[in-house]
Image (cartoon, rainbow, N blue to C red):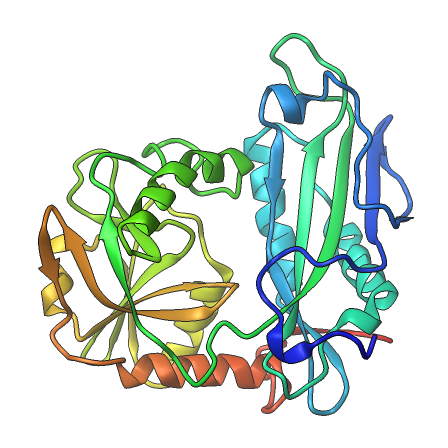
Amino acid sequence: MSTIDWNNLKFSYFQTKCYVQYTYKDGKWSDCEYVEEPYLKMHVASTCLHYGQAAFEGLKAYRGEDGQVRVFRPEENAKRLQRSAERLCMEPVPTEVFLDAVDKVLQSNIDFLPPYGYGASMYMRPLLIGTGARMGVQPSDEYTFILLVVPVGSYYKGGLQSVPALVMEDYDRAAPMGTGNVKAAGNYATGMLPGIMANDQGYPINLYLDAKEHKYIDEFGTSNFVGIKGDSYITPNSAAVLPSITNMSLMTLAEEMGMTVEKRNVNFDEITDLDGIAACGTAVVVTPISHIDKAGKTYKPAKEGIHSRFQDLYTRMQEIQLGQCDDKYNWCHIVAT
């Protein structure tokens, strides 16, 4: 696949050789099926179409300097997909099926995995949907699990870059006791309009406050919130927030660096007392936030520029993902190729 311009990959759909698919029917999961056409055939009454039985995940695979293929913490993605499935009354995908899909889809599409040294990676999108026919509001009796992959480029070219954010006061991401803590597909549909509205005003990212009081920080549109104050790593403790695997990993690395992790309610008014703020997630690891605008007023962290802790955490995470240092936490799943 030498015709691929590895230097100019974007975060967008890219046709690869195939995706892998497993079907749950009659009480068991099928063996792996390789599908080359980028289309699905399903019943018109599938529950994913009518009742929103759909959940997904996102993770990445990397080619290391040593040539090995590493997938970052796929077991945690499997667990989170299982939690999403249980909340949406879907059949959970067993971890062994999830990992089998990871191995087989990468082995089949290995020519599309970016080489080491380009800052690029393979984005992996697991998808679980209800495909059984139902007219009444009830769970499906059949489910389809899919894993597709696309090569994606580096988000940061030339180092970390900070962006502004906007608080969406007229919209809530999730109800306090709703589905905000799982990766339900419907959560992202409801977030599209406020996301577009923020983008139209020049903000690449939007921030949600808690739905009950609009007082505490929940999370950004597609990322967890992180604040740095002195030697403390601060992130919200909210039942409406999606537990980020990236954030969980960064917390471990922060403690390794001698920082104190505070997972607690974070009042929005604390923004100006923090030394630095950032969004974190699979796509970019860390996105520093320069300032946050709310109701016509600008709130900036106490220190100007990108906080050095964010650079340190980003670098450390990349070193683990690319096999440039000892993986003492056994976070990387090695794929035989």
Q: Residue furthest top?
A: 136
Left or right: 330 as drawn, with respect to 132: left
Task: Measuring from the top left, give residue 247's x and y in whole percent.
Answer: 43, 64
Give the image quarter of residue 330: bottom right
The quarter in which the N terminus is drawn is bottom right
Q: Nearer the viewer, residue 162 or 255?
A: 162
Task: Measuring from the top left, give residue 287's x and y in whole percent.
Answer: 37, 69
The quarter in which the C terminus is drawn is bottom right
What residue appears at the point 38 percent right and 47 percent down from the top-left corner?
241
Give the image quarter of residue 224: bottom left
Q: Nearer the viewer, residue 159 or 29?
A: 159
What residue appears at the point 69 percent right and 34 percent down from the top-left corner?
129
Give the image quarter of residue 151: bottom right
Left or right: 286 as drawn, with respect to 259: right
Task: Measuring from the top left, give residue 186's x and y in whole percent.
Answer: 51, 33
Does residue 60 appear in the picture of this structure? Answer: yes
Q: Nearer the viewer, residue 115 or 85?
A: 115
What residue appears at the point 25 percent right and 35 percent down from the top-left corner?
211
Does residue 256 appear in the picture of this structure? Answer: no
Q: Reply above or below: 195 against 227.
A: above
